[in-house]
Image (spheres, helix red, strand yellow):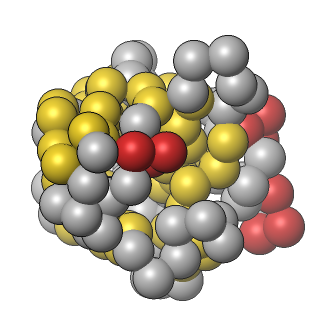
């Protein structure tokens, strides 16, 4: 059974940083695409970023230059390093994974597996 377990959420001040982790189990991590999505209250889930096993990454424009995704395949773990945080980054952040087509990286429906989510709150 595939499981994605997130950690690292919490409270940060505007301008601060947080790092989220997502550890996968029950699967072969190579070729497994890792994505990050977030959902704020009253809003739809939105794409944050994704990374292929070869290191190719994509980011939403609203986080580009502030957030960085990385992965350690030996640990089956993906990371979301968030810097220059803004209050509007407040949301529940979910990691997602799957074996998806390259043009589907921002489509939440393309990801098979999801973590439970971790709250990130940024105060002004």
What residue is shown at x 30% (from left), y 34% (from top)? 120
Residue drawn 26% across the image and 54% down it: 14
In the rendering, at what x and y percent does residue 42 appear? 67, 16
The picture places residue 2, in percent across and down from the top left corner, at: 41, 25
In which quarter of the view is residue 11 placed? top left
User: In x, y percent, where is residue 33?
Assistant: 54, 58
Identity of the residue furthest to the front in this view: 124
User: Looking at the picture, how far across and down is residue 67, in whole percent?
Assistant: 39, 69
Total labels: the figure holds 0
52 lies above or below 105: below
Q: Is residue 54 left or right of residue 21?
A: right
Q: Which residue is painted at 73% across and 55% down in the image?
A: 106
- Left or right for 88, reference 26: right
Could you tell me if residue 34 is visible in this image? yes
Q: Name the residue furthest right.
A: 103
Q: Work out whether residue 49 or residue 91 is closer to the camera in this orientation and state it.
A: 91
Residue 91 is left or right of residue 82, and the answer is right
Residue 57 vertical position relative to residue 11 in the rendered view, above or below:
below
Please tell me whether residue 86 is drawn above or below residue 96 in the rendered image: below
Q: Quadrant of the N terminus?
A: top left
Examine the rendering and report whether any part of residue 22 can be seen: no
Image quadrant holding the C terminus, namely top left
For residue 8, above or below residue 64: above
Q: Residue at x 30, y 68 (%)?
A: 84
Question: In the rendered view, does 39 fall on the left or right side of 119?
Answer: right
Q: Nearer the viewer, residue 86 or 69?
A: 86
Which quadrant of the figure has residue 56?
bottom right
């Amino acid at each position: 059974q595939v499981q994605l377990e997130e950690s690292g959420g919490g409270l940060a001040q505007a301008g601060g940083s947080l790092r989220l982790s997502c550890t996968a189990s029950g699967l072969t991590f190579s070729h497994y695409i890792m994505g990050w999505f977030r959902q704020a209250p009253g809003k739809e889930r939105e794409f944050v970023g994704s990374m292929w096993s070869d290191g190719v990454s994509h980011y939403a424009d609203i986080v580009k230059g502030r957030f960085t995704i990385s992965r350690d395949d030996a640990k089956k773990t993906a990371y979301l390093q968030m810097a220059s945080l803004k209050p509007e980054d407040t949301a529940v952040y979910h990691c997602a994974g799957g074996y998806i087509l390259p043009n589907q990286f921002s489509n939440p429906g393309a990801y098979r597996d999801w973590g439970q989510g971790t709250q990130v709150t940024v105060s002004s």
